[in-house]
Image: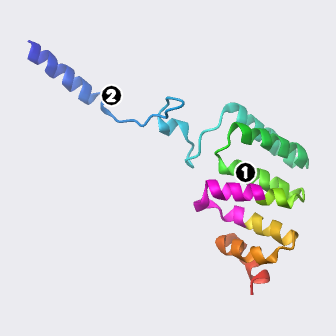
Amino acid sequence: MKKALILLITIFCLSNSYSQIVEIDPITFEPISKSVDTNGYPKETEEVQKMKDEAYIKQQLMDSAGAILLYDKIIELSPKNPANYFQRGNLKYWASRYEECIKDMNFSIKLNPNDATDAYYYKALANIKLNRLQTVCKDLKKGYAAECLLKKYCK
């Protein structure tokens, strides 16, 4: 009887989802697949998502300063998402804050160097505005989206 009970428990355990190995986030104790988005970045809270929506609205209303302030807060709450630095850098570029744009683009590139063509592009644009043409070509060559600028500034 004991052997039959052990056999049944073993079969139950092996057929149940408990037999699956799941990687757990050591901070949130959630499965890793639930703590990252489809791009592999840490999932953002509902609060951060609402702030992004509000920043988008401010951007559409030409309130770049307000959108940048929101992205400052978003980055405090979600500092490991390179898209947040890219978006704030983009806003700073259009607000003619080129040095700050370059810093944000550099941080975005550092967090995600394998998907940074747009960050390199905006970094190059900011350097063009600052008349730092010696660094422009290096950045443009790293981003395929920069072909028209590459032809103009890097003969």
Label 2 packing within 10 angstroms: few (<14), some (14-19), many (20+): few
The image shows residue 8 at horizontal and vertical percentages of 17, 20
User: Identity of the amino acid at label 1?
Assistant: Tyr
Q: Residue at x 20, y 20 (%)?
A: 9
Q: Which residue is mark 1?
A: 85
Specify the quadrant of the image occupied by residue 36. top right
Foreground tag (2 vs 1): 1
Image quadrant holding the C terminus, namely bottom right
Q: Can you give x and y, in whole percent of width and height, for residue 116 in the image?
A: 65, 61
Q: Of helix, strand and loop, which one carries label 1?
A: helix
Please say if 13 is above or below 40: above
Q: Residue furthest bottom?
A: 155
Whether 113 is among the magenta residues is: yes
* Image position, residue 129 (x, y; %): 87, 69
| Segment colored magenta | 103-120
Residue at point 81%, 39% (across, down):
54
Residue at 45%, 34% (x, y): give it: 24
Residue 142 rendering spot, x and y as whole percentages:
65, 71
Nearer to the camera, 95 or 133: 133
Find out whether residue 31 is within the magenta segment: no
Residue 103 lies in quadrant? bottom right
Which residue is found at the position 25% from the left and 25% from the top? 13
Q: Is residue 115 left or right of residue 98?
A: left
The residue wearing badge 2 is: 18
Q: Amino acid at mark 2?
A: Tyr
* 10 Å crowding of disc 1: few (<14), some (14-19), many (20+): many
* Alpha carbon distance from label 2 to label 1: 39 Å
